[in-house]
Image: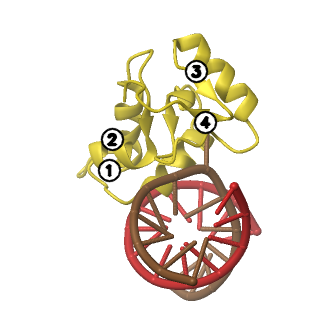
Chain colours: A yellow, B brown, C red
Amino acid sequence: MTDDGGTFTEAVITVIEAIPAGEISTYGEVAAEAGFPGAARAVGHLLRTTHGLPWWRVISTNGRLVPGLEREHAQRLRAEGITVTQGKVRMGQPT
DNA sequence: TATCTGACGATAG
DNA sequence: CCTATCGCCAGAT
């Protein structure tokens, strides 16, 4: 391994795994924390392809939940203590 | 290797 | 509220 075994993926996964319960982050925030600002799209792919990650703690900056899983997503967030309304995360939540 | 798509972000209409 | 466009990275074909 002349280079690290994961420039983007490993960094992003580490950031997502570091999100404490009851808190939520955005794709852009995670990407920026990983060192790849603007790569929010790749973050969404990792959450979707990589399993074992608290994907429900990651939402879009728009407060929009995951399309197709809004019901599942909202339920998980509520279980963590996050307030969800109309398929969106209430503003003022711990980010 | 090239091209397209996508659990994105922001702006514009 | 919705769609459209550009920019970003990873994965699939």
Q: Which amino acid does label 1 sit on?
A: Thr
Can you identify the residue that label 1 sits on? Answer: A7
Percent coordinates x, y for residue C11 in the rendering: 59, 55
Mark 2 and mark 3 residues within 8 Å of each other at the beta carbon: no
Q: Mark 3 lies on which chain?
A: A
Residue toward you, A40 or A6: A40
Give the mark nearest the N terminus, 4 or 3: 3
Which mark identifies residue A11? 2
Mark 1 and mark 2 residues within 8 Å of each other at the beta carbon: yes
Give the mark nearest the N terminus, 1 or 3: 1
Percent coordinates x, y for residue A65 in the rendering: 62, 39
Residue at disc 3, secondary structure? helix
Mark 3 residue crowding within 10 angstroms, few (<14) / some (14–19) / many (20+) = many
Which mark identifies residue A83? none
What whole-number distance in Å separates the C-alpha atoms at marks 2 and 3?
24 Å
Residue at disc 1, secondary structure? loop
Which mark identifies residue A88? 4
Closer to viewer: mark 2 or mark 3: 3
Which mark identifies residue A77? 3
Q: In this view, does A13 lie to the left or right of A84?
A: left
Closer to viewer: mark 1 or mark 4: 4
What whole-number distance in Å separates the C-alpha atoms at marks 1 and 3?
29 Å
Q: Which chain carries label 1?
A: A
Residue toward you, A26 or A54: A26
Residue C10 position (above or below residue A84) = below
Closer to viewer: mark 1 or mark 3: 3
